[in-house]
Amino acid sequence: MQITSFKQYEEDYKKSVENPEQFWGEVAQNFQWRKPWFKVLSWNFNEPNIKWFEGAKLNITENCLDRHLATNGDKPAIVWEPNNPEEESVTYTYKMLHERVCRFANVLKRNGAKKGDRICIYMPMVPELAIAVLACARIGAVHSVIFGGFSAKSIADRINDSQCKVVITADGSYRGNKQIPLKDVIDDALIGCPTVEKCIVLTHIRTPVSMLKGRDVWWEDEVKHVNDICEAEEMDAEDMLFILYTSGSTGKPKGVVHTCGGYMVYAGYTFSNVFNYQPGEVYFCTADIGWITGHSYIVYGPLSQGATSVLFEGIPTYPTPSRFWDIVEKHKVNTLYTAPTAIRSLMSYGEDPLNGKDLSSIRVLGSVGEPINEEAWHWFDEKIGHGKAPIVDTWWQTETGGIMISPIATVTPTKPSFATLPLPGIQPILVDENGNEIEGNGVMGNLCIKFPWPGMLRTTYGDHERCKQTYFSTYENLYFTGDGCLRDEDGYYRITGRVDDVLNVSGHRIGTAEVENAINMHAGVVESAVVGYPHDVKGQGIYAFVIYPEMHGEAELSKKDILQTVTRVIGAIAKPDKILFVSGLPKTRSGKIMRRILRKIAEGDTTNLGDTSTLLDPGVVEEIIAAAKKL
Ligand code: WT7
């Protein structure tokens, strides 16, 4: 399954396009199935209706755990590095992880969870988070992990959208020197969540929590009441594995649905190849399991391949900006997979944090989540990889389940700020506004995918029409990614950023409409418009133009009040970096906000605003420009 030469990449790619069913059927043989498929693929992008490995039966945890026990049971599966470096790190071998997962799966059953039930997980980056995820998969329950930075309201919306029956959380989490009271946030959320029957609470930071009789139980107590034998539930390849909520151009995040068989094959295949993972190596992905990167490349991908995956609770700058390098040295990390925003942030501390750190174990570097600028690429290459570790710039999305366009470490070439070539099985095409294919090299367009791959989303939870509208209706017979893309003279792909109203702030995906809705909930705010602007560390910053005629108190305090509302409604990750109070917004005669103009102003480039003659009130633009200069 592992590609070892450029020639093989070319051959595999060709085969995957000419005979996709044979190609993926062969890849899938590397996994353990209870029953084989009768058809590798049936599909149409119109409904859409996509089925991979139809008729096959499996349980993904048998692939991630059981199948490694005989030969690799004592090999480390998860190495946990706590927030506080003074605390001991903890290693779970495959045998230990299997035991913990089975035991917690029995806890879930004991609390009424069964196949098909939705379970919300809101936890810190501790091994129990991976255990909870795998325990859900073990019993066939559908996990919906919510990133620890989301607010009670965001959690409640997500829980209600998928009618979760059980919530798994912890008393709190550590982030650097901060403590976050997770159970308190859950308590606020659950006031409005009638479907939740049980809440299982892990003790982690030992902060006092309220425990509601009949609903709330302690993780540590529950595991004492069960044994560690839990046969895996037999799942159909197309049964739901998980839901993961992600933002789009509307105000409401959607629940992206991934299924068992195809997702497993795709996460495992891409992990093994892109990182060129070798048995015995230590792999460290710095993402949070609350995002798709953590699902696919901390938990399912690495574990399906019997790898050793480092799970880090903390942040790159705590207690010092040397933390990543300390972890690399301590655990002899061979592969480091991180985000451009983290690289840029660490770059800003200069080279002192690197002094005396032994990074010689590093063999492969990876980047994910947003375009990586050349400066960050070269710093990563020279200072961290010492020019010897290939950088895989991996382009993909929550919806794609796994990496789509990326170098294959040690096999295919890299190029600064380019995701380079599609992986076998991936057929990208560039289209113009009208959906016409843009052929040849040295061209730009909107990035679409024209053929299914096993890891792709199947639907958006509870609203299939929305899935169709969002991804399959912009261009007929194509999956639309929402990204703009350049294909250079060599045929290499470079993702240039979103072409829809979606922002990428520090690798976090946030819809402008979502932020606007949150700002508009603030008392006295009449209207707002949110756009992104280039930010040195975050990639994109959030710029909000707000009409707030009867401002309460002085302007600076009012801005903080609005930030507080955004934190309540979405979470701190969606707080605007800049707020500008304006008396009006540039609108067309039909009432549409002209974001193009606001984007230019936010970028500080007002030399060429384009045609403003169609504006209802062109004067408002001058006023906004003048105010923006003073901000
Ligand atoms: C969006 C998807 C994929 C896991 C993390 C983010 C942007 C992602 C790259 C990259 C340029 C990238 C795209 C994409 N993006 N990776 N290597 N180069 N842009 O997942 O939250 O679903 O966001 O992130 O704009 O559409 P996500």
Image: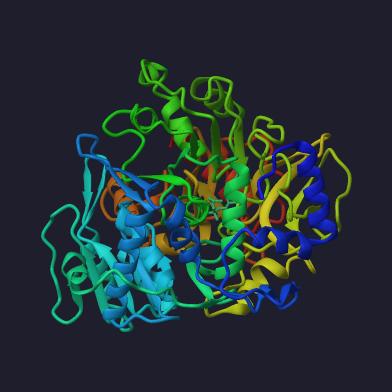
- Residue 447 versus residue 3 in the image, above or below: below
State whether residue 252 appears in this view.
no
Q: Is the residue 611 above or below the residue 534 in the image? A: below
Give above or below for 210 relative to 538: below
Name the residue furthest left. Answer: 208
Q: How many marks?
A: 0
- Judged left or right of residue 410, residue 19 is right
Q: Quadrant of residue 54?
A: bottom right
The residue that appears at 53% across and 48% down in the rendered structure is: 504
Locate residue 601, reporting x and y percent.
57, 41
On screen, residue 522 versus residue 535, left or right, reads left
Residue 411, given in percent of the width and then of the height, sits at: 69, 35
Horizontally, residue 200 falls left or right of residue 598, namely left
- Decide if residue 306 is in sight here: yes
Q: How is the image coloured?
A: rainbow
Q: Nearer the viewer, residue 219 or 8?
A: 8
Place residue 147 in its image quadrant.
bottom left
Residue extending farthest right: 440
Percent x, y of residue 346: 42, 28
Query: Is residue 77 or residue 580 the one in the foreground?
Result: 77
Depth check: give the residue in front, 193 or 284.
284
Residue 437, by quadrant, is bottom right
Q: Where's the C terminus, which quadrant?
A: top left
Viewer-side residue, 480 vs 596: 480
Tell me what residue is drawn at x 35 percent, y 56 percent: 95
- Is residue 355 shown left or right of residue 515? left
Name the outermost residue toward the front. 70
| Residue 241 % position (x, y) | 50, 70
Q: Residue at x 22, y 56 (%)?
A: 172
